[in-house]
Image: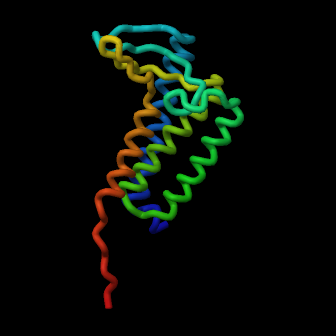
Amino acid sequence: MRAVSQPSVLWSLILGTDVLILDRLHKYIQIDVFGWTGGEVVPITSFFDYILVWNTGISYGLLGGLTPEMLLIVMGVAVVALAFWWAKDDGLLTRVGIALAIGGALSNAIDRIVYGAVADFFHFHVGNFSWYVFNIADVAITFGVVLLVADVLWPRRKVEADS
């Protein structure tokens, strides 16, 4: 029980769960309540649209040629590997980064099971340049990876053993 009370465990579990819930709620409201089916566009600014696009690949449409079952297997292996890393490492940045990535990946995996593809909504563009369409889960995964890179680049203080 003592391990569960560690800040790295508590914060990572809370944030990872929050990402999963927030992304699921957002998609439920847009798709199941408002009935969006794909292709709807709501221009917000000259550089940002709120739109529903179905992503059949993994991140940014990668591996779009794989079957849905194979994509779920790839995602499942990644989540299991991240979960082992989360359990082994006790650093706050590492655990929060991994939890954000797992929360986002699980939500996108649920999309594949429920809808057959991942629902993406946020689209930035400038002139002829169009950024990828993404969702809350993708933001969490990206932020999680940024935290993991920061953890690698920002060395931890060494705690010397008491003699």
Q: Is residue 142 left or right of residue 87?
A: left
Give me the residue at 54% from left, 12% from top: 38
The picture places residue 132, in percent across and down from the top left corner, at 43, 23
Q: Could you say which is closer to the camera, residue 124 or residue 1?
A: 124
Q: Is residue 142 left or right of residue 79?
A: left
The picture places residue 4, in percent across and down from the top left corner, at 46, 61
Q: Could you say which is closer to the camera, residue 70 or residue 12?
A: 70
The picture places residue 147, in percent across and down from the top left corner, at 36, 49
Give me the residue at 56% from left, 26% from top: 118
Question: How many marks overall?
Answer: 0
* Residue at the farthest bottom position: 163
The picture places residue 33, in percent across and down from the top left corner, at 53, 15
Give me the residue at 35% from left, 17% from top: 129
Tell me if residue 50 comes above or below residue 154 in the rendering: above
Tell me if residue 54 comes above or below residue 91 in the rendering: above
Give me the residue at 44% from left, 44% from top: 100
Snapshot quadrant of residue 138: top left
Color encoding of the figure:
rainbow
* Residue at the farthest front position: 128
Q: Quadrant of the C terminus?
A: bottom left
Snapshot quadrant of residue 134: top left
